[in-house]
Image (spheres, helix red, strand yellow):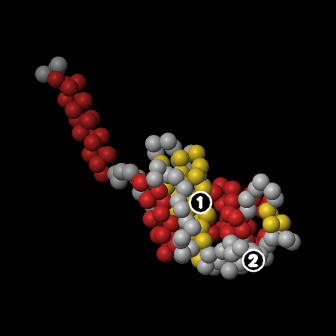
Amino acid sequence: MANLRPLIAIIFSTIVCRVALASRQWPPRSTAAQVANTTQEYLDTHNKARAEVNVGPLKWSEDLAKAASLQVRYQRDHKNCSFANLENSQYGGNQLFAGGSKITPTIVVESWVAEKKFYNYADNSCAQEHQCGVYTQVVWKQSLELGCAQGICTKDQTSLTICFYNPPGNVIGEKPY
């Protein structure tokens, strides 16, 4: 019996660990508070950039967030987290593919806003060999709603974030604000 005690302890420990793991959701799910904080972070960062050029704030759209989530999951599950083709989307869209399994909303939006330094409002142009389209979409004054989602590609620890805007922006020949 003395020889069985270590074995019984190991079996008991294994059962306790399995019960503990089974009682948790796996993969872990976001809490409502985490989702609300993420939503607010996307809005705050967008609206800060918009306020800097005197454009009104965006409002969060659950419909746009759902559409962004569906697109991100499709790209993650069927396209190896590659960029989505958003050309025929009914919404305006920005996306960011980044290393690291969790890129914050602030980092995402600030990377798009960083293009501002290449944008010339006076002649509505972008410096040669640079792009400004994701910045102008962030500050497009006709856009009123925002919805974003992020997918994690665990295989290579990358993420894909997509934000949709309604109505869409970046109309060729028009200034964003």
Which of 125/176 is in front? Answer: 125
Left or right: 58, with 72 as reference point: right
Q: How many marks?
A: 2
Q: Residue at x 20, y 26 (%)?
A: 7
Up the image or down, 100 lies above or below 7; here it is below
Which amino acid type corresponds to the residue marked 2 in the rendered image? Answer: Glu
Give percent across and percent down for residue 31: 45, 61
Q: Residue at x 71, y 78 (%)?
A: 141
Task: Point out the image quarter for the C terminus.
Answer: bottom right
Left or right: 90, with 10 as reference point: right
Q: Which residue is mark 2?
A: 174
Give percent across and percent down for residue 116: 78, 62
Q: On residue 95, which mark appears?
A: 1
Comes first in the chain, label 1 or label 2: 1
Q: Nearer the viewer, mark 1 or mark 2?
A: 2
Which of 147/85 is in front? Answer: 85
Which amino acid type corresponds to the residue marked 1 in the rendered image? Answer: Gln
Quadrant of residue 78 in the image? bottom left
Q: Residue at x 81, y 56 (%)?
A: 128
